[in-house]
């Protein structure tokens, strides 16, 4: 798409190209014209009896392709058989089973206790942070209330001054 965008930019810069087009529009137009051209070519081949020869050549091409695929598989099988016959077959190694380490009961209890202690420490830190946040929020609320009261007092003073 980037190439079509560059082509559209170049065409839009030219003065002899009077329509502003986007890259996607140019690509769609090109695809449409190419499809029409291919359809017209196929139609003219059918009319001029070239259709039969082109169909025959495409069938030959597809047949050769299928034979090549089949022959490549045959060749691979033959090479594998030759290796086996010569004794160069693949030696498979046995996989060793790995045993999981057995945990001692004391180690397990120690691990659990460490996890519990760490969780308690994290919870204590979280409680402290939440208390600090609550205190900060309360301070902010009292400041806002004081500012609001001061504004109300100023507004009342202005109204009283204007009413006199």
Image (tube, rainbow, N blue to C red):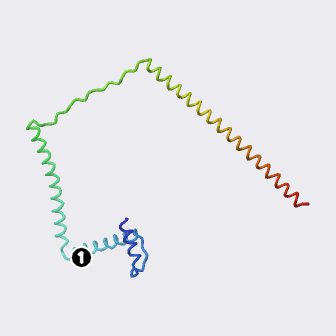
For image coordinates 40% across by 21% down, the residue present is 103
For image coordinates 9% across by 35% down, the residue present is 87
Could you tell me which quadrant the N terminus lies in? Answer: bottom left
Q: Please determine whether, in this image, residue 42 is positioned above or below residue 106.
A: below
Which residue is label 1 attached to?
A: 44
Residue 21 vs residue 9, the one in the foreground: 9
Q: Position of residue 43 (x, y in %)?
A: 25, 74
Residue 75 vs residue 103, the one in the foreground: 103
For image coordinates 39% across by 78% down, the residue present is 14
Could you tell me which quadrant the C terminus lies in? Answer: bottom right
Q: Position of residue 146 (x, y in %)?
A: 77, 46
Q: Locate residue 120: give its quadrant.
A: top right
For image coordinates 27% across by 72% down, the residue present is 38
Residue 159 vs residue 56, the one in the foreground: 159
Q: Identify the secondary structure beneath mark 1.
A: helix
Q: Please determine whether, in this image, residue 53 is positioned above or below residue 136.
A: below
67 sits left or right of 5 in the view: left
Q: Position of residue 19 (x, y in %)?
A: 42, 78
Q: Position of residue 102 (x, y in %)?
A: 37, 21
């Amino acid at each position: 798409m980037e190439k079509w965008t560059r082509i559209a930019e170049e065409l839009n810069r030219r003065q002899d190209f009077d329509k502003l087009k986007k890259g996607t529009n140019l690509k769609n137009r090109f695809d449409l014209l190419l499809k029409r051209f291919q359809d017209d070519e196929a139609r003219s081949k059918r009319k001029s009896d070239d259709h039969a020869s082109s169909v025959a050549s495409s069938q030959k091409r597809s047949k050769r392709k299928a034979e090549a695929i089949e022959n490549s598989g045959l060749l691979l099988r033959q090479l594998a058989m030759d290796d086996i016959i010569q004794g160069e077959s693949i030696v498979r190694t046995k996989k060793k089973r790995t045993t999981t380490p057995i945990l001692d009961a004391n180690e397990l209890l120690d691990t659990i206790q460490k996890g519990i202690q760490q969780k308690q420490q994290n919870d204590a830190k979280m409680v402290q942070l939440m208390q600090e946040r609550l205190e900060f929020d309360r301070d902010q609320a009292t400041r806002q209330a004081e500012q609001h009261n001061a504004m109300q007092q100023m507004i009342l003073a202005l109204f009283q001054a204007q009413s006199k």
